[in-house]
C-alpha cells in the first residue's frame, strides 16, 4: 500500500516538474501539454473505474481486447507512412502500420473467439 | 477533413472504447462490447486516413492488409492454452511500433506535424515526450519478447537471478536518463539510439529474474506498459486519441497486475525484484518438508466415482495442471453425468489458476462449461464447509491451508480456496511433488483428504467409466 502511494506521489511529482515550464509561460493560448495532461489524467480515472467493473471471469478477454485497443498506435504510424517517396522515416512508419494491424486484427478476432465460448443454459444472467 | 472534425470523430471512437471495456462487466454484454471496440477502431483509422496525404493510401492499405492477414491467421490458430503467448507477442508488437514511430518522428518531424525550433531542432517538450515514448516502447518490446519466450517454453521459465542485478538495472536506468537529457539538448541521433539500446537491455533484465508462478503478473504488467507506450507517443504527437486509448489500456493492465499480486499476497515490488519460484523456493521446500513423517491416503478412480455420485454437492477446483493434461472436456462430461445423478456440480476458480488473469475461465468456457456454474474464490469459499466433495485437479498452492495457518510459510496470507473445510477432498495429482511455490501442501495429509494418483485426463475418464 505504502509503495503504491509513494509511486503515485513520485509520478505526480515528476509530471508537475515537467509541467512547470508550460505552467510558467504566460501566454493567451493553452499549451498543448496542459491539454494532453488533462486528457491523460481523466482517461486514467475513467479506465480505473471501468476496468474494476470487469468481471474476473473475463480478465483474459479484457487483456486481448486491450491488446487490440493498444493497436490504436497505428494512427501515429498512419500520419507518416510514405507521403512521397521512401525515406527511412516513412519506411519505419509503414512497418509500424503492419505491426499495429496485427495487434488490431488478432486482438479483436481472438476476443470474439473467446467471448463466443462463454455460454449459459439459464435464461437471464445473474451478471456473473 | 479539418482537424476539428477529426477531433470530434476521435471523441466518438474514445467513447466507443470505453463502452467496449464497460461491456466486459458481464458475459452477456461482452460480445457487444467487442463490437463497440471494433467500431471505435474503424472510426479512428478512417479519420486518420482522411487527414493523411492521399497519395500514400495504396501503401497504407497494403500494409494494413498484410498485418490484418497475419493477425487473423494467428487469432484463428491459437490454442486457448497458448493465450498468454499470443498476448505477450502482441505486447511486443505494440512496443516495437512505438519505437519505430518515435524514430520516424525524430527522423522526419514535419510529417507528424512537429515544427522545429529556429535552430532547426526538435522542441524540448517533443524531445522529452519522444524519449519517454521510445524507452517505454523499447522496454515493452524486449520484455515481452522474453516473456513470450518463457511462456512458450522456448526459454527456461525459471527465474534467473544474479548478484548485483538491481544495481546494474539502476545504473543502466540512470545512464538512459542522462542520454535522454543529452538527446533533448543536442537533438543528436547517437544518444537517442544508445538510449534505445539501453532500454531494450533493461527490458530483458527486468523480466529475466521473474518466472514460474509470477508470469501472470508479468503479462499484466507488460499489458500496462504497452498502453503507456501508446499514450507516450500520443503526447509527442499531440494526439488525444492515442492518449485516451493508451491510458485505458495502461490502467487496465495496472489493475490486472494489482489483482494478480493481491491473489498471491505479494507486492508488485516484490514480484519485480524476482526470485520467486526459483532456487530460493527450492530451499524453503526442503526446510518445510523436513521433520515429521506425514501420511496420506489414496484411492482409485472407482472409489472416487462412488464418492462423487453419492454426494449432493461437488465443487471442482481446477488448476493449470488440468489444462496441461487437456482434461477440461472430460471434466465437462463428468459434470454432465453427475448432473444426471442429481449432484450439484460447481467450479471454483482462484484468480491465479492458469497462466494469465481469467485464463481458467476461458479454458472451461472452451469445454462448454456453463459460466453460471463457475464461481470466483470469494463467492464460493463460504459454501465449502457444506459441500460434500471438493475435487482438486491439477491445483496445489491455491488450496494449501498453510497459507492461512503457518506464518513462516512463503505463501502465508495468500487468499486460498478453502478446500480443506469440505467434508471430503479428492485430489487428482501425478505425485506428491510440490507446486510452483515449492512447498508441501498440508491439505494432502488431512483426514478428510484422498489422493487419486495419475494423469488428470486419464483419471477423469476412468471416473466417467465407473459412474
Image (tube, coloured by chain):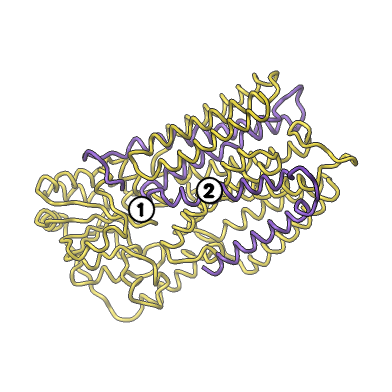
Q: Could you tell me residue B65's position as x and y percent?
A: 56, 24
Farthest-out residue, front:
A28
Please report the residue visible at 37 percent of the width from the left and 55 percent of the height from the top. Answer: B353
Is residue B313 visible in the rendered image? The answer is: yes
Q: Which mark is residue B320?
A: 1
Q: In the visual, does A58 lie left or right of B278?
A: left
What is the drawing colour of chain A? purple
User: The chain shown in yellow is which?
Assistant: B
Q: Considering only vertical position in the picture, is B112 above or below B441? A: above
Q: Could you tell me residue B427's position as x and y percent?
A: 24, 60
Which quadrant of the view contains residue A91?
top right
Please report the residue visible at 53 percent of the width from the left and 28 percent of the height from the top. Answer: B42
Q: In the visual, does B238 lie left or right of B178?
A: left
Please report the residue visible at 28 percent of the width from the left and 45 percent of the height from the top. Answer: B371
Q: Nearer the viewer, mark 1 or mark 2?
A: 2
Q: Which mark is residue B223?
A: 2
Farthest-out residue, bottom:
B291
Disc 1: host chain: B
Q: Could you tell me residue B48's position as x and y percent?
A: 63, 28
Q: Mark 1: few, some, or many residues within 10 Å (few <14, many ≥20)? A: many
Q: Element under label 2?
A: helix
Farthest-out residue, right:
B119
Q: Could you tell me residue B88's position as x and y percent?
A: 52, 45
Residues at discs 1 and 2 both on one chain: yes
- Taking depth in this image into account, of B28 and B90 the one nearest to the observer is B28
Q: Which mark is residue B171?
A: none
Amino acid at each position: 500500500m505504502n509503495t503504491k502511494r509513494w509511486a503515485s506521489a513520485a509520478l505526480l511529482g515528476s509530471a508537475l516538474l515537467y509541467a512547470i515550464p508550460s505552467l510558467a509561460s504566460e501566454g493567451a493560448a493553452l499549451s498543448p501539454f496542459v491539454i494532453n495532461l488533462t486528457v491523460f489524467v481523466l482517461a486514467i480515472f475513467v479506465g480505473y473505474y471501468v476496468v474494476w467493473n470487469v468481471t474476473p471471469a473475463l480478465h483474459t478477454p479484457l487483456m486481448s481486447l486491450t491488446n487490440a485497443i493498444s493497436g490504436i498506435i497505428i494512427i501515429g504510424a498512419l500520419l507518416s507512412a510514405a507521403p512521397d517517396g521512401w525515406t527511412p522515416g516513412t519506411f519505419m512508419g509503414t512497418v509500424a502500420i503492419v505491426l499495429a494491424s496485427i495487434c488490431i486484427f488478432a486482438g479483436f478476432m481472438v476476443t470474439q473467439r473467446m467471448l463466443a465460448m462463454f455460454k449459459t443454459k439459464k435464461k437471464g444472467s445473474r451478471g456473473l | 477533413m479539418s482537424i476539428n472534425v477529426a477531433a470530434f470523430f476521435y471523441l466518438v471512437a474514445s467513447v466507443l472504447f470505453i463502452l467496449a471495456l464497460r461491456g466486459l462487466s458481464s458475459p452477456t454484454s461482452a460480445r457487444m462490447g467487442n463490437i463497440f471496440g471494433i467500431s471505435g477502431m474503424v472510426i479512428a483509422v478512417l479519420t486518420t486516413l482522411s487527414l493523411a496525404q492521399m497519395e500514400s493510401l495504396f501503401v497504407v492499405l497494403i500494409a494494413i492488409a498484410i498485418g490484418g492477414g497475419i493477425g487473423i491467421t494467428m487469432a484463428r490458430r491459437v490454442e486457448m492454452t497458448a493465450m498468454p503467448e499470443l498476448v505477450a507477442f502482441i505486447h511486443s508488437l505494440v512496443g516495437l511500433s512505438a519505437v519505430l514511430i518515435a524514430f520516424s518522428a525524430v527522423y522526419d518531424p514535419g510529417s507528424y506535424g512537429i515544427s522545429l525550433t529556429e535552430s532547426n531542432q526538435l522542441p524540448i517538450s517533443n524531445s522529452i515526450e519522444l524519449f519517454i515514448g521510445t524507452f517505454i516502447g523499447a522496454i515493452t518490446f524486449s520484455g515481452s519478447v522474453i516473456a513470450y519466450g518463457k511462456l512458450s517454453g522456448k526459454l527456461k521459465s525459471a527465474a534467473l537471478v544474479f548478484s548485483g542485478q538491481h544495481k546494474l538495472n539502476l545504473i543502466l536506468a540512470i545512464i538512459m536518463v542522462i542520454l535522454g537529457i543529452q538527446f533533448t539538448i543536442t537533438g543528436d541521433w547517437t544518444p537517442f539510439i544508445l538510449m534505445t539500446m539501453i532500454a531494450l537491455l533493461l527490458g530483458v533484465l527486468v523480466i529475466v529474474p521473474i518466472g514460474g508462478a509470477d508470469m501472470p503478473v508479468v503479462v499484466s504488467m507488460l499489458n500496462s506498459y504497452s498502453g503507456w507506450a501508446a499514450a507516450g507517443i500520443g503526447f509527442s504527437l499531440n494526439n488525444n486519441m492515442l492518449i485516451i486509448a493508451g491510458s485505458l489500456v495502461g490502467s487496465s493492465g495496472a489493475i490486472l497486475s494489482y489483482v494478480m499480486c493481491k491473489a498471491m499476497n505479494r507486492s508488485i515490488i516484490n514480484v519485480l525484484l524476482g526470485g520467486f519460484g526459483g532456487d530460493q523456493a527450492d530451499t524453503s521446500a526442503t526446510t518445510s518438508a523436513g521433520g515429521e513423517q506425514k501420511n496420506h491416503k489414496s484411492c482409485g478412480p472407482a472409489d472416487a466415482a462412488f464418492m462423487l455420485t453419492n454426494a449432493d454437492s461437488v465443487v471442482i477446483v481446477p488448476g493449470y495442471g488440468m489444462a496441461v493434461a487437456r482434461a477440461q472436456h472430460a471434466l465437462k462430461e463428468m459434470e454432465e453425468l453427475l448432473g444426471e445423478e442429481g449432484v450439484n456440480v460447481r467450479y471454483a476458480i482462484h484468480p491465479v489458476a492458469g497462466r494469465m488473469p481469467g485464463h481458467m475461465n476461458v479454458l472451461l468456457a472452451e469445454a462448454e462449461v456453463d459460466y453460471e456454474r463457475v464461481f470466483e474464490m470469494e463467492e464460493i469459499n463460504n459454501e465449502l464447509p457444506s459441500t460434500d466433495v471438493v475435487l482438486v485437479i491439477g491445483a496445489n498452492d491455491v488450496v494449501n491451508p498453510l497459507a492461512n495457518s503457518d506464518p513462516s510459510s512463503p505463501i502465508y496470507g495468500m487468499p486460498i480456496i478453502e478446500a480443506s473445510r469440505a467434508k471430503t477432498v479428492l485430489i487428482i495429482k501425478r505425485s506428491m511433488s510440490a507446486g510452483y511455490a515449492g512447498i508441501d501442501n498440508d491439505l494432502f495429509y488431512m483426514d478428510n483428504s484422498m489422493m487419486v494418483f495419475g494423469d488428470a485426463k486419464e483419471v477423469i475418464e476412468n471416473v466417467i467409466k465407473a459412474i
